[in-house]
Image (cartoon, rainbow, N blue to C red):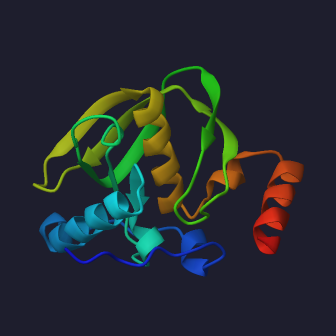
Amino acid sequence: MEVMPILRWPDPRLATPCTPVEDTKAVAELVERMFATMYDAPGRGLAAPQVGVTQRLFVMDAGWKTGPKTPVVCINPVAEPLGAVDEGVEACLSMPGVEVTVPRPSRVRLRYTDLTGEEQVVALEGAEARIAQHETDHLDGRMHFDNVAPETRAAILAAWETA
């Protein structure tokens, strides 16, 4: 399967809120290409806007780097916070080499449609919860650095511009 180019910040498509997916069957080929791209990068999550598609869709596989592949397709996802907020280090395929300590709820309830058109509701925690929230942020036109203090955000962007 062909790997897609991953957009880099500050591409304006990364700051654009995405539109809902209307037909889950119509995105099947896109999903295959996104998984190929994510595994090649190598990442644990990839949102459609990172490959230039402004639709509410992401793919993730939290454990494939240390165990078997467990790919998940999330169409039109909504993440509901459940747990206490924890800080964790996040990387982003659209800003390679930049790690940001981001506060996020440790648990979420994720509602989404799968590739077969079935609605799913799952409780996620740990890495899976963090990845789902990170990718959902992309669908809302947000980057990981949008979740930190303004002075930290400014320092991250200044370092990125000089890299």
Which residue is found at the position 57% from the left and 64% from the top?
A: 141
Frontmost residue, 147 versus 50: 50
Residue at the right extreme, as displayed: 151
| Residue 69 position within the rendered picture, expressed as x and y whole percent measured from the top left | 22, 43
> Is residue 57 at least partly visible in the picture?
no
* Number of disc labels: 0
Identified at 35% across, 42% down, the residue is 65
- Whether residue 105 is situated above or below residue 133 in the rendered picture: above
Q: Is 68 placed left or right of 8 in the picture?
A: left
Which residue appears at 40% of the width and 59% of the height? 46
Answer with left or right where residue 86 lies relative to residue 161.
left
How far across and how far down the image is residue 142, in percent?
60, 59
26 with respect to 102 (left or right)? left
Q: Residue furthest front?
A: 66
Residue 8 visible to an observer of this rendering: yes
Image position of 105 with respect to 39: above or below: above
Does 70 sit above or below residue 25? above
Relative depth, front residue between 67 and 70: 67
In which quadrant of the rendered view does residue 35 lie? bottom left
Position of residue 14 measured from the top left corner of the image (x, y, whole percent): 56, 71
Q: Is residue 130 left or right of residue 73?
A: right
- Residue that protrudes farthest toward the top in the picture: 84
Q: Position of residue 145 (x, y in %)?
A: 70, 53
Q: Quadrant of the N terminus?
A: bottom left
Residue visible at 59% across and 20% down in the picture: 84
Q: Quadrant of the C terminus?
A: bottom right
Closest to the observer, 29 or 44? 44
